[in-house]
Image (cartoon, rainbow, N blue to C red):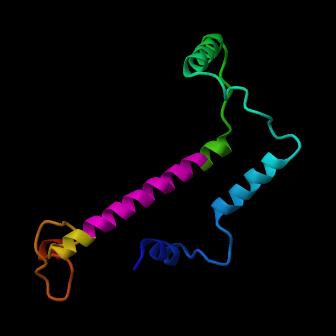
């Protein structure tokens, strides 16, 4: 079973509904094509040294200013997105470890002992816990 198929089955993503990335991309493109979209990038032709000097002058000028409080709703969304990404990467990593362990005849839980329980993919130690 492919990983994207597995995730679609787990989270119930429908192929009929547009993906969140496509919706965000369409919103970005429509925003950029609006009349109030930014013009030419003024920093495009500057060298790295010039950009570094500008950044250092901005940092020096903002050293004494007070930082604006971030929006708690945006923080929550960012935290949830990061948590989801970490969880997805951890799940893919763990599924890979399980696949290798089972292919080697090892327990899918501890990945150290041989599978010694009849009809099961775990060892007797993990089964007794």
Q: Position of residue 74 (x, y in %)?
A: 65, 44
> Along the line of sight, which residue is nearer the eye, 85 or 39?
39
Is residue 66 rendered magenta in the image?
no
Question: In screen coordinates, is 113 left or right of 97?
Answer: left
Q: Is residue 34 placed above or below 10 in the rendered structure?
A: above
Q: Residue furthest front?
A: 45
Q: Residue furthest bottom?
A: 119
Is residue 87 rendered magenta in the image?
yes
Residue located 68% across and 70% down the image: 18
Question: In screen coordinates, is 112 left or right of 64?
Answer: left
- Magenta segment, which residues? 78-98
Q: Position of residue 23 (x, y in %)?
A: 71, 61
Residue located 86% across and 47% down the image: 34
Q: Is residue 52 placed above or below 113 in the rendered structure?
A: above
Quarter of the image with the C terminus is bottom left
Q: Position of residue 98 (x, y in %)?
A: 26, 69
Q: Is residue 102 placed above or below 41 in the rendered structure?
A: below
Examine the residues drawn in magenta and state their main secondary structure.
helix
Q: How many labels sit on residues?
A: 0
Quarter of the image with the N terminus is bottom left
- In which quadrant of the rendered view does residue 63 lie? top right
Residue located 75% across and 52% down the image: 29
């Amino acid at each position: 079973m492919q990983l994207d198929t597995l995730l679609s089955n787990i989270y119930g993503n429908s192929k009929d509904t547009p993906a969140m990335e496509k919706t965000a991309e369409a919103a970005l493109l429509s925003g950029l094509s609006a009349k109030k979209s930014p013009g030419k990038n003024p920093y495009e032709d500057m060298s790295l040294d010039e950009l570094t000097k500008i950044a250092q002058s901005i940092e020096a000028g903002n050293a004494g200013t007070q930082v604006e409080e971030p929006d708690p709703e945006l923080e929550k969304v960012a935290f949830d997105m990061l948590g989801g990404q970490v969880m997805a990467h951890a799940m893919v990593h763990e599924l890979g470890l399980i696949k290798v362990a089972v292919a080697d005849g090892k327990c899918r839980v501890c990945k150290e002992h041989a599978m010694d329980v009849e009809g099961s993919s775990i060892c007797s130690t993990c089964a007794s816990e």
